[in-house]
Image (cartoon, grey):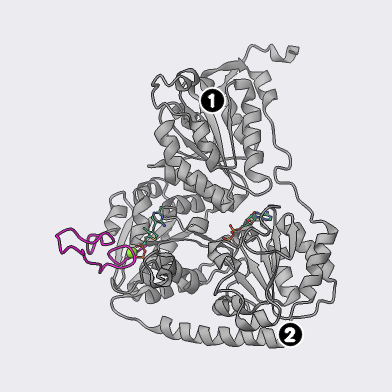
């Protein structure tokens, strides 16, 4: 102990947690108060942090995850013990699955009582339960270790492959007092939490050689590329090589979707025909049919020697997870893309015109067909006519953030609504999880200050619908559009028994979702036509007022499971 620690001024666990977060540039907390963290939320607000208080922890957790994806700082979710912790855990696991950095901080009960299972208030061994569901989990027992605990949590969330971290703070910690000067000295400002990782020169050369040999190259951009915030490098890779590219859902807008090299409208063609595919922050998981099967490798492609992959990823164990990767490039996307471009030299040969011409031809044909469909104005609206309105709104407001969940509402929006700027599309991600809607929308509004448009299936909206009160309370510029087709996938299912209960996928007909927003002082509108939807969205974006538009969609228009019908165990595709 030095003399500096003898000032007589004291600090405590509450203040040290707040100071540690602030020291590391974390300004927002997504929380739900209660014992033992009520005073932490109050004190954080008093200390100048923005504390967004939710109605359910899962949505606070989803907000933290989205904040992490958007800002490259771990989003913070703060909950009470056992039930609050468990409510936040789904979001923590989902963040980890999606490689979003977040920290779930939960208060916990007394260690001695929990460990002897003596029945404390909200008793639960939270650390043990969290561990398998996140990237790292830590517990702090002493006030003087708070600095280390927060630093470890931040570094774990951000370094390498980003993910969710759990930080367990027992109730007793918060009131522990210690000398203020010593406390301040115990805090750590994390230096370079996500260090650049430069790919090895021979790995770069291997990738360069393979790419140079390609006759039908394709670049596949994933949400890792969006997260990495090296937009200029990614754009340079695409434009300098002239290679057609395909964005995964949340990579849309890294380059504008109307870019000449976008192959989105020729997706099945390029996946089947490409000979060398450059994966940039995208995993070959179910969303890409695991890199094999009918989606990949047409007969022609197989006869021409098959398909080979270059995979750029920060995780050294991602390569070969589904199919052989001929040229893995391990490192951060910015460094890998720059190294690849440097390796290709200054005079990069464009891909053969036969390939780019064939892709353009397919694309133009499909775009013409889509334009015809979008021009129709059926009554009631179907997914296409309603999404055409959203498409035009995003075109007019490219800086708006689009949050999207549902089945048909998701799948159609992904292909119909073009994005023009990076990190403007937030959706159900790797799990295809319902319930991210309002949490993501709130974080998008809080973190970016831009208008937010949440396009929600009526079922999807129900998972987080109560958070419209949160949106109204903080007066956030969020326009929720509920695609109301009276149910999950469609509103027309019937009870197989002939009984009086409705079918499991059917909801109350003609539900008045707009009244939910009105209940809390926001604007609620019904839109029966495309013109009404357009007017309501225009007004919502112009006013910035919390708005919910109940968009009435033909209840017969959707298909079972949207576009993933084949994953349903009873679908024709899975019957032998
Ligand atoms: P998508 O669903 O869009 O295909 P995935 O979530 O499957 O994307 O893949 C994202 C990948 O990006 C993960 O494998 C992750 O390790 C990787 N990743 C995330 N951040 C970076 C980064 N900064 N540099 C390199 N790779 C990254
Ligand atoms: C946490 C299963 C996938 S999509 C969906 C459910 C329930 C809702 C589809 O209906 P919605 O969309 O939103 O009305 P639409 O346009 O087709 O009518 N629980 C969780 N996650 C998932 N994915 C489900 C259930 C599901
Ligand atoms: Mg629906």
Mark identifier at residue 420: none
Foreground of the two, 200 or 512: 200
Q: Above or below — where is 263 with respect to 1?
A: below
Q: Which residue is mark 2?
A: 352
Using residue 142 as the reference point, say whether residue 512 is left or right of it: left
Q: Above or below — where is 428 with respect to 353?
A: above
Foreground of the two, 398 or 320: 320
Question: For the residues carrying marks 1 and 2, which lies nearer the camera in this image?
Answer: 2
Q: Could you tell me how many numbered marks the image carries?
A: 2
Q: Above or below — where is 304 with respect to 576?
A: below
**Residue at image point 73% right, 43% down:** 192
Please provide percent x and percent y for residue 64.
52, 45
**Residue at image point 44% right, 86% down:** 372
Q: Is residue 53 visible?
A: no
The crowd level at tag 1 (other Cα within 10 Å; few <14, some 14-19, many 20+) is many
Q: Secondary structure at mark 1?
A: helix
The residue most toward the front is: 576
The image quadrant that residue 364 belongs to is bottom right
Using residue 517 as the reference point, say whether residue 191 is left or right of it: right
Q: Which residue is mark 1?
A: 14
The image quadrant that residue 573 belongs to is bottom left
The magenta stretch spans which residues?
Answer: 482-511
Q: Main secondary structure of the magenta part?
A: loop
Q: Quadrant of the C terminus?
A: bottom left
Q: Above or below — where is 569 with respect to 57?
A: below
Residue 492 belongs to the span the image colors magenta: yes
Please provide percent x and percent y for residue 193.
70, 42
Using residue 254 as the reference point, say whether residue 350 is left or right of it: right
């Amino acid at each position: 102990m030095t003399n500096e620690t003898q000032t007589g001024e004291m600090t405590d666990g509450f203040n040290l947690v707040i100071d540690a977060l602030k020291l590391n540039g974390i300004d927002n907390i997504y929380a739900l108060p209660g014992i033992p963290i009520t005073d932490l939320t109050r004190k954080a607000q008093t200390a100048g942090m923005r504390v967004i208080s939710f109605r359910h922890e899962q949505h606070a957790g989803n907000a933290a995850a989205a904040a992490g994806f958007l800002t490259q700082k771990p989003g913070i979710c703060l909950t009470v013990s056992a039930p609050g912790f468990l409510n936040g855990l789904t979001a923590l696991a989902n963040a980890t699955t999606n490689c979003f950095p977040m920290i779930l901080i939960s208060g916990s009960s007394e260690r001695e009582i929990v460990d002897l299972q003596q029945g404390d208030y909200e008793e639960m061994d939270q650390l043990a339960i969290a561990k398998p569901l996140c990237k790292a989990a830590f517990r702090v027992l002493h006030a003087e270790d708070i600095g280390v605990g927060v630093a470890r949590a931040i570094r774990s969330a951000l370094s390498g492959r980003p993910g969710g971290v759990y930080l367990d703070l027992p109730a007793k910690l918060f009131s522990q007092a210690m000398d203020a000067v010593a406390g301040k000295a115990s805090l750590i400002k994390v230096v370079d939490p996500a260090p650049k990782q430069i790919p090895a020169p021979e790995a770069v050369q291997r990738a360069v050689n393979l790419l140079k040999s390609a006759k039908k190259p394709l670049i596949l951009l994933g949400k890792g590329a969006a997260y990495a915030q090296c937009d200029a490098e990614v754009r340079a890779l695409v434009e300098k090589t002239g290679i057609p590219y395909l964005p995964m859902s949340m990579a849309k807008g890294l380059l504008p979707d109307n870019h000449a090299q976008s192959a989105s409208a020729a997706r099945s063609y390029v996946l089947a025909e490409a000979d060398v595919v450059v994966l940039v922050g995208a995993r070959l998981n179910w969303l890409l049919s695991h890199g094999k099967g009918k989606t990949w490798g047409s007969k022609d492609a197989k006869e021409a020697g098959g398909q080979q992959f270059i995979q750029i990823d920060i995780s050294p164990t991602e390569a070969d997870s589904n199919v052989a990767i001929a040229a893995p490039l391990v490192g951060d996307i910015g460094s890998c893309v720059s190294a690849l471009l440097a390796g290709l030299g200054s005079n990069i040969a464009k891909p053969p015109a036969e390939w780019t011409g064939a892709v353009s031809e397919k694309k133009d044909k499909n775009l013409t067909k889509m334009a015809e469909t979008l021009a129709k104005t059926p009554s009631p609206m179907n997914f296409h006519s309603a999404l055409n309105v959203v498409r035009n709104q995003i075109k007019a407001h490219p800086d708006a953030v689009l949050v999207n969940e549902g089945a048909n509402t998701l799948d159609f929006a992904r292909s119909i609504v073009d994005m023009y700027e990076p990190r403007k599309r937030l959706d159900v991600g790797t799990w295809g999880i319902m319930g991210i809607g309002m949490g993501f929308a709130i974080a998008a509004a809080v973190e970016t200050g831009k208008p937010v448009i949440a396009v929600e299936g009526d079922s999807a909206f129900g998972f987080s619908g109560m958070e419209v009160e949160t949106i109204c309370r903080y007066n956030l510029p969020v326009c929720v559009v509920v695609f109301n087709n009276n149910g999950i996938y469609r509103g027309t299912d019937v009870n197989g028994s002939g009984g009086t209960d409705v079918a499991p996928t059917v909801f109350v007909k003609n539900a008045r979702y707009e009244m939910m927003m009105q209940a809390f002082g926001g604007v609620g509108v019904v839109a029966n036509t495309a013109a009404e939807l357009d007017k309501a969205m225009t007004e919502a974006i112009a006013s910035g007022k919390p708005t919910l538009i109940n968009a009435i969609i033909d209840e017969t228009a959707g298909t079972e499971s949207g576009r993933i019908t084949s994953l349903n165990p009873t679908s024709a595709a899975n019957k032998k």
